Image: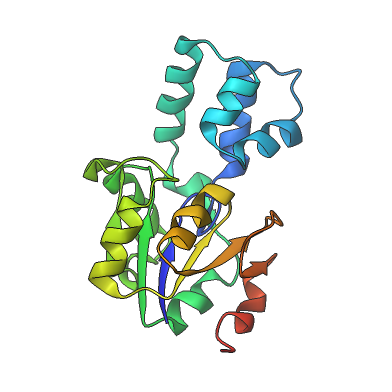
Amino acid sequence: MNILWDFDGTIIDTYPVYTRVFQRIAGEHIPLDKILAQMKVSFTQAETHFQLTEQQKKQLRFECDQISVDSVSPFPFVEDILQRADTNVIMTHKSKQQVIDILTYHRLYDYFTDMVTADDNFPRKPNASSYRYLHEKHKLNLAIGDREIDILPAKEIGLKTCLFQNNTAGADYYLQSYKEFHILFSE
């Protein structure tokens, strides 16, 4: 199986750090679960919903880009799926160096054949051009993400989709834990 992965919230559990940064910038009175609910739609949605100023948005992006590799962790059992897949590729809005640094620190980098990052200047999700590019190059079967905007481009180009820790309608598969990875390899 050839899998296209989202990065934040799918391979690496970055949301605990991101929500705390967001709360500090937007206001300590905002509950973390409310911030997370908006971020699970998109960062832009969260910024709009909580009416962040342009300065706050810049500060949020800057601080999230500066997170240390040891402040985040891979999700439990994600490595089991990475090991079983024939090909793993990433599509993320993070910089390539951030992704490489985090994956290398957590000893996951060697599982990935290719990646499209913010440095590659593709349009942002849910635009399908980056997915199309990776699919044409690697003949993908499945896209795994934690948000609807991760599966919309995959569906557009005909890939099977899996939502991780998100029950939004429209995915082919749903996983709450990667311990259930056998579901993805049962076909």
Which residue reaches farthest bottom? 187
* Residue 66 can be seen in this image: no
Q: In which quarter of the image is residue 167?
A: bottom right
| Residue 148 point in image, percent of width and height | 58, 50
Tell me the quarter of the image containing the N terminus: bottom left
Whether residue 38 sits left or right of residue 135 in the image: it is right
Judge by depth and name the residue closer to the eye, 41 or 117. 41
Q: In this view, does 4 lie above or below 73?
A: below
Seen at 60% across and 67% down, the residue is: 76
Look at 52% across and 48% down and name the residue there. 149
Query: Quick check: can you spot residue 169?
Result: yes
Q: In this view, does 26 lie above or below 129?
A: above
Q: Where is residue 120 in the image (x, y as percent from the top left)?
A: 23, 45
Q: Which residue is drawn at 46% across and 12% down?
A: 54
Q: Position of residue 16 (x, y in %)?
A: 62, 42
In the picture provided, is 122 more to the left or to the right than 108?
A: left
Q: In this view, does 64 lie above or below 148?
A: above
Indicate the position of residue 75 as horizontal and vertical percent values: 58, 62
Is 182 left or right of 12, judged from the image as shown?
Answer: right
